[in-house]
């Protein structure tokens, strides 16, 4: 097996860029996946990594390490220093895979349940929403192009593998997201604090609908709310004016899938 022990190695520099640059990931059509569990889940779900990079400690510590390596087209043993260079965390596990970005796979059904993410900013929120959507049974995600990259390290980590399993598609903006969903015969609701908003428990959610979640600071633009079939509000007690985007999305998803 190959070995890389220098942090100045050309491949190491390339992979650091792959982890840090959205533009470079898109140009290369690849992304860097980190962590024993995430890499293990990827290969179990049929992903064939181009490269697997593991430290000696990782080979000893994680039972799935050799299985991961066996599925990679190319295996490389790396030093702890290289692992630290590649990692997006303070205490890296020493397990990395370089994978191809798969084609977008979302096909909308008029009886499905979907979520639209419009101009979110926080990678942690995006990853958490993806994880929740997969766990509760949402059929797919429509996201605007200005949301954090689904293949960034922080989104991948927060999604816990959900990025690799949840069908999604990217659109230019919130208006296109709503139009795309409505063209498929879906009712589209806006999670928005508007004067005309209806409590979410009173809406006809379930099969054949979608919910749009907006930016953490500003919510959905008024023109996007107007383009939706109705605005939905989550009833709250106390003095809180709004919920975290990921929390709001989770409650909206639950209302869609529980019926």
Image: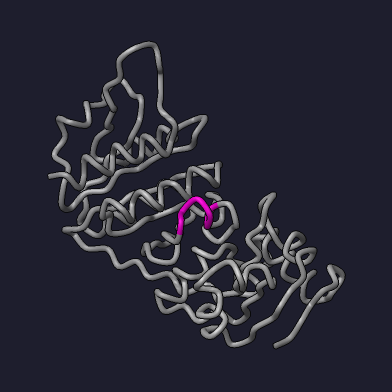
59 relative to 250 in the view: left or right: right
Report x, y in % for residue 159. 46, 54
Q: Could you tell me which quadrant the C terminus lies in? A: top left
Q: Measuring 67% from the left and 62% from the top, which residue is drawn there?
A: 19
155 relative to 91 in the view: left or right: left
Is 70 above or below relative to 233? below
94 relative to 231 in the view: left or right: right
Is 23 above or below relative to 172? below
Q: Could you tell me which quadrant the N terminus lies in? A: bottom right
Which residue is farthest top? 239
Report x, y in % for residue 157. 53, 54
**Near-viewer residue (188 or 28):** 28
In the picture, residue 105 is in which quadrant?
Answer: bottom left
Report x, y in % for residue 102. 48, 74
Q: Measuring 30% from the left and 54% from the top, which residue is drawn there?
A: 181
Q: Is residue 224 magenta?
A: no
**Near-viewer residue (246 or 210):** 246
Q: Main secondary structure of the magenta part?
A: helix
39 relative to 249 in the view: left or right: right
Task: State the extent of the magenta-drawn residues as a range.
Answer: 155-160
Report x, y in % for residue 180. 33, 57
């Amino acid at each position: 097996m190959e070995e890389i022990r220098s942090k100045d190695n050309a491949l190491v520099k390339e992979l650091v860029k792959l982890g840090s640059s959205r533009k470079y990931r898109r140009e290369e059509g690849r992304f860097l996946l980190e962590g024993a569990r995430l890499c293990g889940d990827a290969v179990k779900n049929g992903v064939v990594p181009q490269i697997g990079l593991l430290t000696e400690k990782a080979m000893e510590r994680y039972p799935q390490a050799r299985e991961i390596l066996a599925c990679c087209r190319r295996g490389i043993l790396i030093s702890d220093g290289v692992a630290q260079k590649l990692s997006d965390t303070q205490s890296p596990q020493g397990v990395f895979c370089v994978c191809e970005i798969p084609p977008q796979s979302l096909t909308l059904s008029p009886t499905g349940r979907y979520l639209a993410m419009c101009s979110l900013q926080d990678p942690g929120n995006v990853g958490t929403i993806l994880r929740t959507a997969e766990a509760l049974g949402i059929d797919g995600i429509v996201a605007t192009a200005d949301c954090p990259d689904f293949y960034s390290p922080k989104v991948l980590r927060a999604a816990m593998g959900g990025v690799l399993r949840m069908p999604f598609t990217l659109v230019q903006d919130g208006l296109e997201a709503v139009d795309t969903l409505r063209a498929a015969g879906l009712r589209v609701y806006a999670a928005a604090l508007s004067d005309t908003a209806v409590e979410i428990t009173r809406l006809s959610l379930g099969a054949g609908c979608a919910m749009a979640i907006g930016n953490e600071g500003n919510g959905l633009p008024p023109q996007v709310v107007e383009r939706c079939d109705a605005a939905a509000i989550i009833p709250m007690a106390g003095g809180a004016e709004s919920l975290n985007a990921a929390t709001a999305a989770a409650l909206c998803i639950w209302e869609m899938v529980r019926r």
